[in-house]
Image (tube, helix red, strand yellow):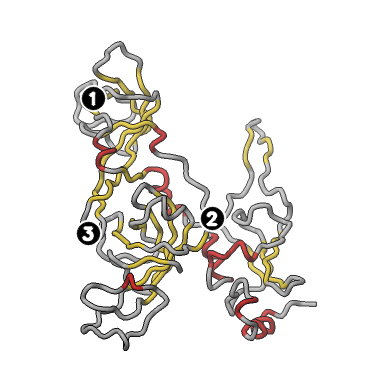
Amino acid sequence: MRFNLSKWLVTLLFLPVWCMAVVIRPDAPEVYRVKKGDTLWDISAMYLTQPWLWPELWRTNSHITNPHLIFPGDELRLVINEDGEAELVLSRETTDKPQKKLSPEGRLVNKSNTPVPVLPWSVIAPFVKNAVVLTEEEFNALPKVLIDYDDTVRYATEDVVVGEKGIVSDEMLVLRQERSIYDMQDNKIGVQIRNLASATLIPTQNQQYSLLKLDKSRMETRTGDRLAPVSIMPEPEDIQLRSAENQRGHILGNLQEHDLMGRLDVIVIDLGQQHVAPGTVMGIYKRGPVVQGDSRDNVDKSWLPEIFDSEEGPQLPAIKTGELVVFKTFARTSYALILDSSDIVRRGDIIARP
């Protein structure tokens, strides 16, 4: 029997809330073929009002071992299981998506499709691979680049540079401070660092200085740049979407230092790795205006608690204006990507559970 999505959605509206694991969008497609350029968030948003609940739609799907790995060409079908729950069933030509074959030249070539990314990788890749936030003390403790061995002003790939002693690894990175990050009380809580180049230590008998050969330069190195082991830029973590629970914080700004932010902007928030993990989805809320006077009896309360009340008086309920997802965390801050925004996002906007 052909599944009637419209009839099922009408029935769904009359089910009690406690028996609904996820809420399917009324315009969700019965069948969708994954295309190149799709992201997991985009596909999830087609089916769910809460896209971070994507794994709930897979449940007992035996066709796939990792619900965060789907590929262009895969066909997704919305069905109802024996328990009356919505499921997405995956159809593909083979369960072993990655394949290898020998090319005519005899080289081993990976013929697999690239899995659909959770987030738009082209937007966040520069920040995942080449950016990190350190405390000011951590950055100042790193050894400096002193001079180019040939005494030029700027140095690039294949140049040899002289660095301060304190090099502890054969493989190093050249780093530069780009900007300082301040919390909502204007306290400096970190410095944004950019990876300029990689470098290899050259053995030398000199105990006062180090010699390093620049291997891969993304930008020209200058005197005063810092040197650090490659471990300071850890490998990207696997991102799996999950909803924030009790965490609350603020948007501190855009990495390009724009005052106004919106969809697909990379931003900094004031929650660190003790509070959030890569994949944490949070709502963005605009503060309501302060109500003058002492009486709070006539002020409607939103589900958000009294953190929105100021010393000047209670505030009207905050309005949700968008969603973000954390993709890289540090000691006191994190990088996040704005996924949706119905209004302009500014420094100081509240972030909380979506």
Badge 2 local density, few (<14 within 10 Å), some, or many (20+)? Answer: some
Query: Could you tell me how far apart the alpha carbons at marks 2 and 3 are, in whole angstroms?
Result: 32 Å
Pinpoint residue 68: horizontal percent, then vertical percent.
Answer: 59, 55
Classify 223 as above or below 69.
Answer: above
Q: In the image, what residue occupies the spot 74% across and 70% down? A: 81
Report the mark closest to the observer, 2 or 1.
2
State whether residue 222 appears in this view: yes
Classify 147 as above or below 134.
Answer: above
Pinpoint residue 187: horizontal percent, then vertical percent.
Answer: 22, 53
Q: Which mark is residue 148?
A: 1
Q: In the image, what residue occupies the spot 60% across and 79% down? A: 17
Pinpoint residue 351: horizontal percent, then vertical percent.
Answer: 37, 65
Query: Could you tell me how far apart the alpha carbons at marks 2 and 1 are, in whole angstroms?
Result: 44 Å
Q: In the image, what residue occupies the spot 32% across and 62% down? A: 251
Dot 2 or dot 3, earlier in sequence: 3
Q: Which residue is mark 3?
A: 185
Dot 2 or dot 1, earlier in sequence: 1
Q: In the image, what residue occupies the spot 26% across and 33% down? A: 141
Q: Callout 3, which amino acid?
A: Gln
